[in-house]
Image: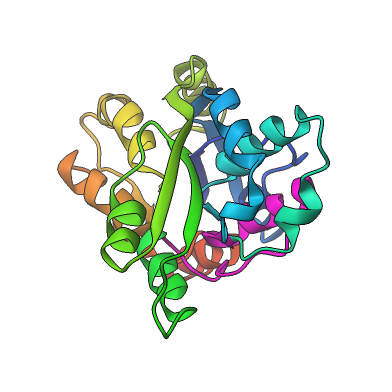
Amino acid sequence: MNNIAIFKAESETEKIDPYIEILRKKGHKATLIPTLAFSFINSEILQEHLSQPDIFEGIIFTSPRTVEAVNKSISGSSDNLLPKWRSKKNFCVGESTANLARTLLKFTSLGEESGNAEQLCNFILSSYPDGCCKSFLFPCSNKRRETVPTFLQENGFKIIEVVSYETICNPSLKSHWEKLVIEQGLPNILVFFSPSGVQYCHKLIKESYFGTSLPKIIAIGPSTEKALIEASLTPYKIAVKPTPNAVYEIIESLS
């Protein structure tokens, strides 16, 4: 049985985090350390674009928070816009984002098998083999990377970007970590889901394991892998897809 710490944002819509759920069912100790907090911004700008569905091919979602941002903005509109957006080509990175789009917006999205933004961009490009000059709405974080707008614009797409939320360190991060260490001891496996999570946690991790061996670290995706390496926390394994099963399979392989 492993003692596993999951460093990711806490879901506002799920009673139990799906990563925690699958690991506990398989007999592991698994604890969520809520690493990030979010503040939604520019809702009026996003709402203005959402009120013009006819000029867009669809929406590109790269995180659950982008789905929540659209849901908050579109819910504040006096027009019933969701049916028009549901008929479009909406794309998602990963199962978590796609599941939330289905739950909150009733969207049937494309590309959820993509494990990261680069894979999704390639999937979108393959969906238009004859070329494209279509416009997509791209709600994103203030910490978003250049992958989506740069890749797609270089291939003829028009990307309307709206910074829809800010990512900050969860103010309870340290207390959650200290509680885990006191009650269960230092975890032997850490799972990081984002570069921001690494940024906010790496000093705390190094201080906690000072004088002892570092645990095995799993990164979700290449961006998180890069952030861990830069923070001198070299990951042991990389999960190609951000799914509970992918993480579980890696942890089983460590046993």
Residue 186: quarter of image? top left
In the picture, measured across the screen, residue 219 lies left or right of residue 64, that is left
The front one of 106 and 160 is 160
Residue drawn at the location 55% of the way across and 63% of the way down: 248
- Give x and y (percent) for residue 58: 59, 58
Pick the residue in front: 127 or 84: 84
Looking at the rendered structure, the number of numbered marks drawn on it comes to 0
Image location (x, y in percent) of residue 67? 63, 44
Q: Is residue 98 one of those drawn in magenta?
A: yes
Left or right of residue 56, residue 253 in this image = left
Q: Is residue 116 left or right of residue 74?
A: left
Considering every residue shown, the one lying at the far bottom of the view is 129
Q: Position of residue 4 (x, y in %)?
A: 50, 46
Residue 195 falls in which quadrant of the image? Answer: top left
Residue 232 appears left or right of 170: left
Q: Which residues are magenta?
A: 91-116
The residue located at (48%, 25%) in the rendering is 177
Query: Which x, y percent locates residue 188?
Result: 41, 46
Residue 33 visible in the current orientation: yes
Q: Residue 94 sits in which quadrant?
A: bottom right
- Can you see residue 240? no
Classify 46 as above or below 178.
Answer: below
Instruction: Judge whether 75 appears above or below 133 on screen.
Output: above
